[in-house]
Amino acid sequence: MESEKVFSISFRSVFGAPRRERARRAVTLVREYVEKHLGTPVVKIGPALNETVWADGIQNIPKKVKIHVKVSDDKATATAELADVPFTLPEAEEKPKKEKADAKADAKADAKAEKAQNVEKGQEKKSA
C-alpha cells in the first residue's frame, strides 16, 4: 500500500542564491527534502508543483509550498505534488515512437528490396 505524507517546505534558504538560480534551487531543495525525510532515492516532481515554483519566473519563487508526497510500496520512488492537487503524472507515450521506428525499418526494408530487384533486372539485361 502506498503511503502519503504532507510537508510544508520553506524556500527561505533559496533566497540567498543568485537571482538567476532560485527556481532551479527550489526544485532541488524539494527533491533533497523528500529524499532526506522519506529515504527514497528517486523523487518525481508533479507538474502542478513545478508550475507553481516557476510561475513567476526564475527569480521570483514562492516563499513556501505545501506538498503531499506519495511513496511507492517498495520505497524506491516518491512523487511530490501540491497539497491541493490530485496526483496526475503524464504517462510516457511509447507507441508513436515505436510506430516511427517501425516505419523507418519498413522503409529501409522496402529500399533494400527495390535495390535487390534493380540488381536482378540489371543482371537479366546483361545476360540477354
Image (spheres, rainbow, N blue to C red):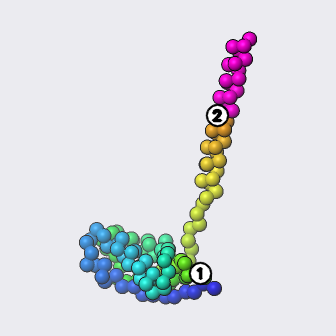
Judging by the rendered image, the residue that carries numbered circle 2 is 111
Q: Residue at x 48, y 84 (%)?
A: 39
Q: Amino acid at mark 2?
A: Ala
- The magenta region covers 113-128
Q: Label 2: few (<14), some or many (≥20) within 10 Å?
A: few
Distance of label 2 from label 1 (alpha carbons): 48 Å
Instruction: Give percent across and percent down for residue 65.
Output: 41, 83
Q: Residue at x 34, y 69 (%)?
A: 57
Instruction: Using the image, determine if residue 125 lies above or below residue 78.
Output: above
Instruction: Using the image, determine if residue 105 lies above or below residue 46.
Output: above
Q: Quadrant of residue 56?
A: bottom left
Q: Is residue 111 left or right of residue 9?
A: right
Quarter of the image containing the N terminus?
Answer: bottom right
Q: Nearer the viewer, mark 2 or mark 1?
A: 1
Instruction: Using the image, determine if residue 25 lies above or below residue 33.
Output: above
Instruction: Give percent across and percent down for residue 43.
Output: 48, 76
Task: Please identify the dominant SS of the magenta region.
Answer: helix
Q: Quadrant of residue 55?
A: bottom left
Judging by the rendered image, the residue that carries numbered circle 1 is 74
Q: Is residue 102 left or right of residue 40?
A: right
Q: Is residue 118 magenta?
A: yes
Q: Residue at x 72, y 13 (%)?
A: 127
Taking the image as drawn, is residue 52 in sight? yes
Asked if disc 2 and disc 1 are in contact, CB closer than 8 Å, the reply is no
Q: Amino acid at mark 1?
A: Asp
Q: Quadrant of residue 88?
A: bottom right
Identify the element where label 1 is drawn.
loop
Quarter of the image containing the C terminus?
Answer: top right
Instruction: Give percent across and percent down for residue 64.
Output: 37, 83
Mark 2 vs 1, N-terminal side: 1
Q: Label 1: few (<14), some or many (≥20) within 10 Å?
A: few
